[in-house]
């Protein structure tokens, strides 16, 4: 199965080139034309990257999360491992931050512990909603995103709840 | 909505850093966050440029339309507002396929290009269309068949069976996608 992720890109590139050649498209100048447009769209998303990274980092590095969770930890400790909660909360906001927490869990409890498996499934089952939304909408200049965040976060909540249920069922607590 | 979250993250972060005596936080973050964003940008930049170049060939040869028609049996139902065989559908299909095999960074250019094509169909340029939101829900719920980066990280930390989480992650991701699409559909229907 994982061989697929290695061969799909070369196959796609080959397919695009063969089909373009077959349809008599000027391959090289089309590539350059598209690449020039690519520079514009890459640059247009930079402000969104900077603003998100900045705000998320200020929030994370202020230590507010560890402060809050030192209070509620006893409450949750019996139900699910505490380190999972900030990870679940951070998953839609920052992919790298939740990845760091997952690594911490692997380090302290091991990847084959309940928390380690749960963290893996959580990390694998959803994407960084807030980042994707700001990036994709930002790139085309959309400011009124309507119900996009609501729908995206709803999907995340379902993913997180299902992760907890599935890991408890399949591997046991 | 995004600006509320952005503002809250900043305000809570700054107030808390003051309260806990870490006054230099913002000063430090101005430098380190900019650096981190620049790194992300430098990683993304060449990937976007290369794929946008390749996609131009696919666009001119009509390959995107062909893919759009191939997947119209399912994408047509998800995106009723997009005309049949529109190039955006071909890009959406490619984005989902690349995402499925766990190549998130290669999927981004397809997503950006798809948004560009969807924006051409948009009559109110600053407002998201229904098709855009459905696409983003599909994208953020992350339909990944093989979470390659997680599996390799698990292997690195000596997991006895690094890939044992695949089936759980797959079912969870399918549920979150279905959940997201359902709420998307219900909101759309409610708005009519």
Image (spheres, coloured by chain):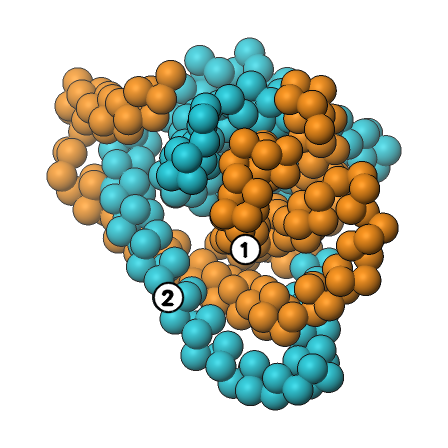
Chain colours: A orange, B cyan
Q: Is mark 1 on a helix, strand or loop?
A: helix
For residue A83, above or below residue B81: below
Is residue B95 visible in the rendered structure shown here? no
Which residue is at a point 20% across and 24% down the rendered structure image? A14
For residue A92, above or below residue A172: below
Q: For this view, does B3 lie left or right of residue B63?
A: right
- The image position of residue B58, as x and y in percent, is 29, 29
**Residue A165 sits in quarter:** top right
Mark 1 Cα within 10 Å, few/some/many (few <14, many 20+)?
some
The residue labelled by disc 1 is A97
Chain holding disc 2: B
Location of the C terminus of chain A by quadrant is: top right
Q: Distance between the residues labelled 1 and 2?
A: 17 Å
Is residue B156 visible in the rendered structure shown here? yes
Chain holding disc 1: A
> Is mark 1 in CB contact (under 8 Å) with mark 2?
no
Front residue of this view, candidates B171 and A10:
B171
The residue labelled by disc 2 is B38
Which residue is at a point 67% across and 30% down the rendered structure image? A163
**Residue B39 sits in quarter:** bottom left
- The image position of residue A65, as x and y in percent, is 69, 63
Which residue is at a point 35% across and 52% down the rendered structure image? B44
Report the mark closest to the observer, 1 or 2.
Answer: 1
């Amino acid at each position: 199965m994982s061989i697929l992720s290695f061969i799909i890109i070369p196959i796609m590139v080959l397919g695009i080139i063969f089909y373009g050649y077959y349809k008599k498209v000027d391959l090289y100048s089309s590539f350059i034309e598209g690449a020039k447009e690519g520079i514009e769209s890459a640059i247009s998303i930079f402000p969104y990257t900077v603003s998100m990274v900045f705000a998320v980092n200020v929030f994370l590095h202020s230590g507010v999360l560890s402060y809050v969770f030192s209070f509620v930890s006893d409450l949750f400790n019996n139900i699910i491992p505490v380190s999972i909660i900030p990870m679940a909360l951070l998953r839609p906001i920052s992919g790298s931050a939740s990845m760091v927490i997952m690594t911490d869990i692997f380090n302290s409890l091991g990847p084959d512990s309940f928390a380690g498996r749960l963290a893996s499934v959580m990390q694998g089952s959803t994407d960084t909603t807030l980042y994707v939304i700001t990036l994709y909408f930002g790139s085309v200049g959309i400011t009124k995103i309507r119900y996009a965040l609501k729908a995206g976060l709803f999907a995340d909540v379902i993913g997180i709840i299902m992760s907890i249920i599935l890991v408890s069922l399949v591997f046991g607590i | 909505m995004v600006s509320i979250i952005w503002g809250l993250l900043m305000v809570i972060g700054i107030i808390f850093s003051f309260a806990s005596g870490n006054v230099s936080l913002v000063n430090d973050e101005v430098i380190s966050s900019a650096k981190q964003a620049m790194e992300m940008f430098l990683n993304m930049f060449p990937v976007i440029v290369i794929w946008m170049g390749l996609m131009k060939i696919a666009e001119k040869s009509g390959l995107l339309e062909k893919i759009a028609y191939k997947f119209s049996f399912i994408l047509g139902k998800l995106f009723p507002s997009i005309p049949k065989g529109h190039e955006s559908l071909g890009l959406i299909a490619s984005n989902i396929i690349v995402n499925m095999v766990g190549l998130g960074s290669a999927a981004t250019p397809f997503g950006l290009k798809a948004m560009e094509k969807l924006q051409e169909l948009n009559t109110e340029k600053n407002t998201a269309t229904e098709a855009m939101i459905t696409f983003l829900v599909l994208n953020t719920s992350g339909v990944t068949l093989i979470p390659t980066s997680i599996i390799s990280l698990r292997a690195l930390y000596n997991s006895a069976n690094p890939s044992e989480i695949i089936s759980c992650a797959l079912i969870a991701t399918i549920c979150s996608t279905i959940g997201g699409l359902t709420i998307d559909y219900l909101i759309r229907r409610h708005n009519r």
